[in-house]
Image: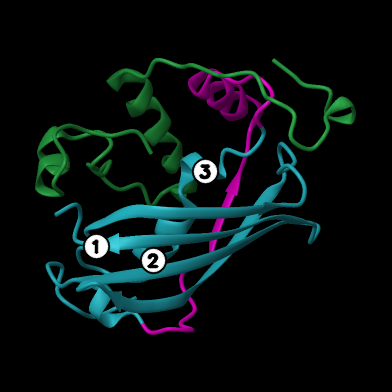
Amino acid sequence: MSADTNKMEVGCQLNPVSKTLDQDRMDRFEKFVRVLVTEGEETEEPTTIHTDPEKAKSMGMERPMAS
Amino acid sequence: MSTQGSNANIYDSLVVGEQLAHLEYIVTPDLLEEYQEVVGYKESFYPHIAAKEYIEVIKRKHVGTLPVISAKHKDEYYAPPPVGKRIQVTGWVKDKYERRGRNWLVVETFAVDEDGREIVRSEHSFLMGGVK
């Protein structure tokens, strides 16, 4: 998907984008934070409101939400 | 790193202007390819959003709990992070304030590559304590 920004004018209507998220995709997205873990200093993978139903409920949400 | 107990709320110990942790990472070809597949956009080049630099700079310095909901995220993009080059991130506490009985935290991060090229500057606002 790409757009020729040179042909865009202020106020032009952009094409809508629709995506379906599921927990697996959200879990995989959250794993990218591990790129920041220094080799040799690995820690347990954290649970977050994006991956853990209980954590999400503790923060007032019905279910995990995408970040 | 803070000396507070592991159950202490980190928010209380953060000071406006405080320098947070320094992060470094490398975007490998495999990582970028996986990121593009996960977000469903093959032309995306900024996996820092998934790496959440803005929260990691806090957690790497302070021990404790930080129950937050992201409320606002503003980025200024300068150049995509070059694949294979080390990306260095610094962060600081930009603001803390109370509004309508809730505590808010604003964290700013700035990333450059190993040659000093500016990559991205981010400002992230957090609502403490979750949805009520």
Q: Earlier in the sequence, mark 3 or mark 2?
A: 3
Q: Chain under label 1?
A: B
Residue at the (59%, 61%) spot, across then down: B89
**Label 1 residue SS:** loop
- Disc 2, disc 1: CB below 8 Å? yes
| Position of residue A9 in the picture relative to residue B59 (left or right) | right
Viewed as shown, does residue B124 lie left or right of B132? right
Judging by the rendered image, the residue that carries numbered circle 1 is B66
Q: Given the image, on which type of amino acid does mark 1 rest?
A: Leu
Q: Residue at left 74%, top 35%?
A: A11
Give SS at disc 2: helix
Looking at the rendered structure, the secondary structure element under dot 3 is helix
Among the 4 quarters of the image, the one containing residue B80: top right
Q: Is residue A48 left or right of residue B75?
A: left
Q: Are marks 2 and 1 on the same chain?
A: yes
Q: Are marks 3 and 1 on the same chain?
A: yes
Q: Which residue is mark 3?
A: B49
**Amino acid residing under circle 3:** Ile
Pointer 2 chain: B
Q: Please, which chain is the residue tagged with disc 3 on? A: B
Image: A30 above or below B12: above
What segment is highlighted magenta in the picture? B15-44
Q: Which residue is mark 2?
A: B58
Say which chain is cyan: B
**The C terminus of chain B sits in image quarter:** bottom left
